[in-house]
Image (cartoon, helix red, strand yellow):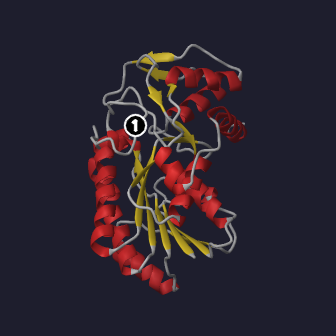
Amino acid sequence: MNVLVTGGAGFIGSHTVEALLGLEWVDRVIVVDNMYMGSYTNLYPAGDKLVFINRDIRDLEALISEFKRRGLSIDGIIHLAAIVGVDEVNKDPYTGLTVNVGGTISILELARRMDSSRIVYASSAAVYGDPGRVPVSEDYPASPTNLYGESKYIGERLVDRYRLDYGLSTISLRYFNVYGPRMRPGPYSGVIYKFITALLRGEAPVIYGDGGQTRDFIYVSDVANANIKALESKASGAYNIGTGRETSINELYMKICGIIGYCPQPRNAAPRRGDIYRSAASIEKAIRILGWKPRVSLEEGLRLTINYYRKLLA
């Protein structure tokens, strides 16, 4: 089986590629990435099963030509390439929407024209907006509160439309707050990356608002496993990928401090515009239908992540 992973050189993508490469039933893992957020070091050394294509997912005809030139077929697709995060899409909505929506149309067309048998689409908990109940289940009406959430929900609807109109086998996974080694650095990095790297440098990180806001933090290897379970499944529709555990930012900070052994008073800042206050996933549907459940506890995942960055920043 040949599996295409878009955005495969990025954070979640590289962990998914690594997991796929270890499976006997996978013949080739084809990574398409324009390296906007990816890194070659996330992929290599990988062996002969890996094929890398440096292309933008929005360039459909160039992608098709490249696959034909190399004689590559596509049996399954895990579509991860996206502009990820509320702030980045808000800052540059044109790029955010052309990648997240236009790029998804391009990959769906690639699947349709090349007779791919299965597509896994990476969506986001951002489609729920500010849910009226926690944990939130997949039957809660989607109500995004920002352009990023809108772009992921439009992607879900396109994926379902191609399933209904063209017979593609599709599924959407709504990721909650993913963390682990190889997280994206820079101004749009997540809270766990910011906390860990600040503390390892002897600095006090920033907490926005009162720190009582909650998130559902899931370790990246569990997400990679969910991608593979979804690829193997014939199920359709949307599935939450989280832990079902609600953790406040203050609690998260104390856990990271405890592992690192350094706990300065954090700097406080005003709440960020558009931030929801509570978020946690109901994962009963994924457990029941996909046969997937998270294996890595928050404490274990934080230790693994801290050890990775401790070595990286040494």
- Against 207, residue 67 (above or below) is below
Q: Seen in the image, is 152 located left or right of residue 201?
A: left
Whether residue 12 is visible, yes or no, is yes
Please provide percent x and percent y for residue 145: 27, 37
Q: Residues within 10 Å of mark 1 (few under 14, many from 20)?
A: many
Please provide percent x and percent y for residue 198: 59, 27
Q: Residue at x 43, y 16 (%)?
A: 210
Q: Residue at x 44, y 66 (%)?
A: 119
User: How many numbered marks appear?
Assistant: 1
Residue 183 found in image quarter? top right
Quadrant where the C terminus lies? top right
Please provide percent x and percent y for residue 212: 45, 19
Q: Residue at x 57, y 52 (%)?
A: 292
- Against 304, residue 84 (above or below) is below
Q: Residue at x 46, y 41 (%)?
A: 176
Please provide percent x and percent y for residue 277: 38, 26
Q: Seen in the image, is 204 located left or right of residue 33?
A: right
- Judged from this view, the residue extending furthest toward the top is 265
Q: Secondary structure at mark 1?
A: loop
- Foreground: 195 or 120? 120
Q: Amino acid at mark 1?
A: Val
- Foreground: 51 or 2? 2
Q: Disc 1 designates what residue? A: 136
- Against 73, residue 307 (above or below) is above
- Judged from this view, the residue extending furthest toward the front is 288
Residue 48 found in image quarter? bottom right
